[in-house]
Structures are given as structure tokens and as C-alpha cells.
Image (cartoon, helix red, strand yellow):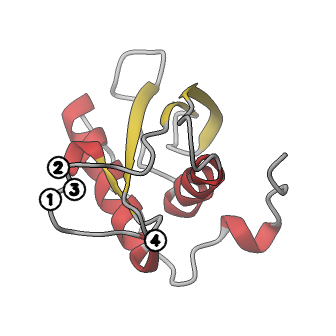
Amino acid sequence: MPPSLGASDLVPAQALPAPAAVSSWEELRHQVAQRLMAANAEQVYRHKAPAVLLAVPVFQVELHGDGRIKRIELLRAPRQAKDTIEIARRALHRAAPFGDVQRLAKPWIFTETFLFDEDRRFKPRSLD
């Protein structure tokens, strides 16, 4: 079982600027990906994803109206490198909040896929 999240694990090492309100799902997906990259700079890669990936966990994230995370559900677990699940969960928490989503139709739920390389660094699929 992965270790539980402590308060220090949920706060980014470097504070992110306040997220902008979003008016479309495309804007939200872009803002989520950008915040994931910024909040987890030491754990991401910026080049094209390698042909062979170590792990590809997929999550469904439900938000409160202000963009805070309400719930994270694992939709697809990797067969190997199970620790990448917790790495991705922590990355989502560090990147949140994701911006006011109240202009979007409910439910405020999106899916995020993490592409992990052999060094356990990731990139959100929406950026590849």
C-alpha cells in the first residue's frame, strides 16, 4: 500500500500563481497540464514521449467549483511500476487548484493520463 499523503506532500515546493477561471473544457485541460508541469518541474520531461513507456496511469479527477480537487479515482493502473500511481496523485495535488470551473457544465470531472518514462518522470498526455 502506498504511503499516505502528508501536508508537505500536497504543497508545491514553489508556489504557483493563482489559476485563471476557465470557460471551456479545452482551457481547463490546458491549464491542468501547464500547472502539472510547473508544480512538478523536477519530475517531468518536456520532450516527446518515448516509444516505450514505463507506466501509463489514468485518473478521473472531480473538482469543486473553485477548482480544488474533490476526488481522484484511478481508472487505469499500470501493470508495472505501481509506485507511479502515487507519484501522479501527488503531482495532481501539488498542481491544484485548477481554476474556477463554475462556467462549465456539471459534473466538473476530467480525465488525465500520465506518460512515465524509465526514469519515473512524467508528462501529461495532453501535451504530447
- Crowdedness of circle 3 by 10 Å Cα count: few (<14), some, many (20+)? few
Query: From mark 4 to mark 3, how far is it between C-alphas?
Result: 19 Å
Say whether residue 106 is visible: yes
Q: Residue 128 versus residue 33: which sits nearer the camera? A: 128
Q: Is residue 114 left or right of residue 95?
A: left
Q: In this orientation, does residue 17 appear?
A: no
* Labels 2 and 1: the sequence-earlier one: 1
Q: Amino acid at mark 2?
A: Asp
Label disc, if present, on residue 48 of the rendered structure: 1
Disc 4 or 3, which lies upstream in sequence? 4
Residue identified by numbered label 4: 40
- In the structure shown, which secondary structural element does the residue marked by tag 2 occupy? loop
In the image, which disc is placed on residue 128? 2
Q: Are marks 2 and 1 in contact (CB under 8 Å)?
A: yes
- Residue 93 location, quadrant: bottom right
Q: CA distance from mark 4 to mark 1?
A: 17 Å
Residue 42: x, y in percent? 44, 80
- The answer to whether marks 3 and 1 mark residues whose Cβ atoms lie closer than 8 Å is yes
Q: CA distance from mark 2 to mark 1?
A: 6 Å
